[in-house]
Amino acid sequence: MLPVEEARARIIAALTPTAAETVTLAEGAGRVLARPVAARLTQPPADVSAMDGYAVRAADAVEGASLALIGAAPAGRPFEGTVGSGQAVRIFTGGFVPDGADAILLQEDATASGGSVRVNETVKAGRHIRRRGLDFSEGSEVLPAGRKLTARDIGLAAAANNPWLAVHRRPRIGILATGDEIALPGDPIPPGGIVSSNAHALAALVRVSGGDPVVLPIAPDDTAAIAEVAATAHAFDMLVTTGGASVGEHDLIQSALGGEGFELGFWKIAMRPGKPLIWGRLGRTPVLGLPGNPVSALVCAVVFLIPALGKLSGLPGAPAPTRRVISGVALVENDKRADHLRAILAVDAAGRMVATPAATQDSSMLATLARADALVLRAPYAPAVEAGAEVEAILLGELGV
Amino acid sequence: MLPVEEARARIIAALTPTAAETVTLAEGAGRVLARPVAARLTQPPADVSAMDGYAVRAADAVEGASLALIGAAPAGRPFEGTVGSGQAVRIFTGGFVPDGADAILLQEDATASGGSVRVNETVKAGRHIRRRGLDFSEGSEVLPAGRKLTARDIGLAAAANNPWLAVHRRPRIGILATGDEIALPGDPIPPGGIVSSNAHALAALVRVSGGDPVVLPIAPDDTAAIAEVAATAHAFDMLVTTGGASVGEHDLIQSALGGEGFELGFWKIAMRPGKPLIWGRLGRTPVLGLPGNPVSALVCAVVFLIPALGKLSGLPGAPAPTRRVISGVALVENDKRADHLRAILAVDAAGRMVATPAATQDSSMLATLARADALVLRAPYAPAVEAGAEVEAILLGELGV
């Protein structure tokens, strides 16, 4: 059985990011830049006022002085003249500082009457002026390639005058649920069967993680049916299967895929839930075979599929970030499989995050997984710990899943 | 000037959630349930095996015994007969436990040969059996109204046989940027003008926060132009304006909106960046007037718009969660305005999160905001603190913005 970290590293190493596409600025949020964004202008484009007040010469603007008001410079309408000795120009935040002026007299430090303004507080040269290029300069890189764009980044790209962005294509992920016993929600359920939950849960996870999911029709446990789907795998950046990965069933998937030139990477991971997992390649298309058990499938998706989607999207493919939290209960010594305990988070009186694993960690309990806020990580052979000890956990809310 | 908390509370109190709509399960992730989801079946539907092995009578399955193999019960194909004394049925994970059997003999504890199986380890009654209804029972609520659905919840709703979900409509948010001096990216820039970044940054923020943004054409600083847009406000669940909120400009927005029956709530908040903010109502439509300054607009959006979108979407409208982090630098005593310092996060050797505010907190610096990971919160009159002190911060990554 392969350790989790090694399995993940092999998956990430085998994947390459999708090619670039051009999208509008409005479509860019959440996408990963394939090329850097450069500033196409300098911001601010000139020295501008940081406050509402009067553009003055600092040498004149001493307490008690009276200055002649010769014009106004609101944002967007620069004053065309020059501020001479003994003169002032009304200015507003963002207004260009007129030629001749070298300081801003705040409006709360001035009294305007008729055509003049009285200085109530001596100003300092350079005060309340934002220098040209304070935010960014034309030609400089404002956003690097590989960055996953936030709403703030979209604002920055816009301010730097970029209506278009080059981003990695969303990886298109085929999702294939297999099994004679499963039916889609609302469809007739075969005797002894269950309702298929994996495909749509995985589709939601793929979408929130930056991918473009394609849910394929359920394939029965039948070599020909699975091979038929496998023959279309070239349409996807990755094919994710669920079911057919456990002992015995493993042969089914492998023999079904074999006809299409399936190359097995590995298929057993030292983890719980989720031991049976298939990793391989069908022609050019990477294949991730998740367990059929819904809890195992989703935990494996957090551990392997989300980093894989990251790598395909142009990110490093790092594992989910972990945080140190306090265990709300004592934990027994772990066995050889890395465990992922479904846990509820709370904040204690000292402001620390406390994770309390559900008492029953049965991998069939989807309701427990849905209610969980975190997966508490227990490394292979991790020693027993007391309640109150620090443990590492993946916060599911941070992943958006 | 109104305190931040009071302003936010007044905004949240004035908003009501959108009505419900029916969406497919596949569209449900990220939406907020308007009605609870009930289980339409019991899961597991019968007692099932938790492992691969043999369904046996515990009384017979003592070490050394040999049991007659009378059939198989894979998942989805229940064994129709009864396990009698001295008999066993091959069973796989998820297979229904046949009548007569009361325990599972693990396959690793058994040796099968021909038509019989030898017990190598005595089994206990009830072992490795998942009881009917362990996950959920028909008629029980599996997901409550008001829950924002995760990928895991979609799996649970599917497993409980729900192809449709009743969720709150995505609030439709009109976004209006005003100003003579602004141009859209790629459009000609007027002399002394700047490129408009707020509308598309806010649209991205609205989308990631569960809303449906409609970016309106830029309105010049002109009462008639703004009034024309205002007359269409009834189409939106909220109208967000940006620009025209500062001293002087305030009159413009207010007089422009006044003709349409604008009712002002409040317009000055004791916060930095972002003091000028308009809150009111245009007929039935709530109006949030954000500052024109991009950094102020986005910080105000984090503080007020995201909770407002939450409330409109059917959530409580809670403020962004804060975390206690370590300040990487000494912070001076704060003045009367709640401050939101743009900061970079790092993790120190002890695993603690350290937030280091940018040295220059000028509200014109969009690049600094884009690079920030967190907003360090400084309450009005917060005392000076040393580097290494605990402070509260909003982690922008957690908000997805």
Image (cartoon, coloured by chain):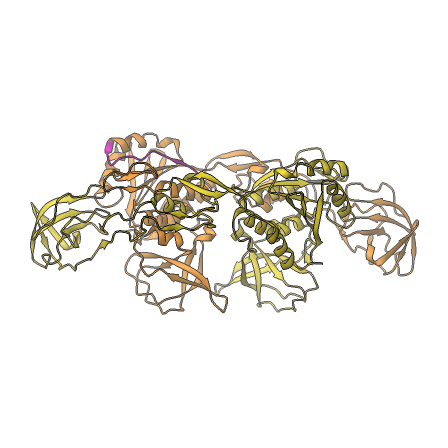
Chain colours: A yellow, B orange
Which residue lies at the image location 32% right of the left edge and 67% below the top edge? B384
From the viewer's perspective, tell me whether residue B154 is left or right of residue A222.
left
Q: Where, quadrant-wise, is the N terminus of chain A in this rendering? A: bottom right
Location of residue B356 in the rendering, given as x and y in whole percent from the top left corner: 39, 62
> Viewer-proximal residue, B37 or A220?
A220
Residue B220 on the magenta segment: yes
- Is residue B209 visible in the rendered structure shown here? no
Residue A376 on the magenta segment: no
From the viewer's perspective, tell me whether residue B79 is left or right of residue A254.
right
From the viewer's perspective, tell me whether residue B253 is left or right of residue A228.
left
> Viewer-proximal residue, B295 or B22?
B295
Task: Name which quarter of the figure residue B105 lies in.
Answer: bottom right
Which residue lies at the image location 71% right of the left edge and 37% below the top edge? A219
Task: Name which quarter of the figure residue A196 lies in.
Answer: top right
Total numbered circles: 0
Location of residue A61 in the rendering, given as x and y in whole percent from the top left corner: 11, 57
- Compared to residue B228, the image places residue B296 above or below, namely below
Q: Which residues are magenta?
A: B212-223
Location of residue A192 in the rendering, given as x and y in whole percent from the top left corner: 77, 40
From the viewer's perspective, tell me whether residue B93 is left or right of residue A383.
right
- Is residue B132 visible in the rendered structure shown here? yes
Location of residue B164 in the rendering, given as x and y in whole percent from the top left corner: 59, 35
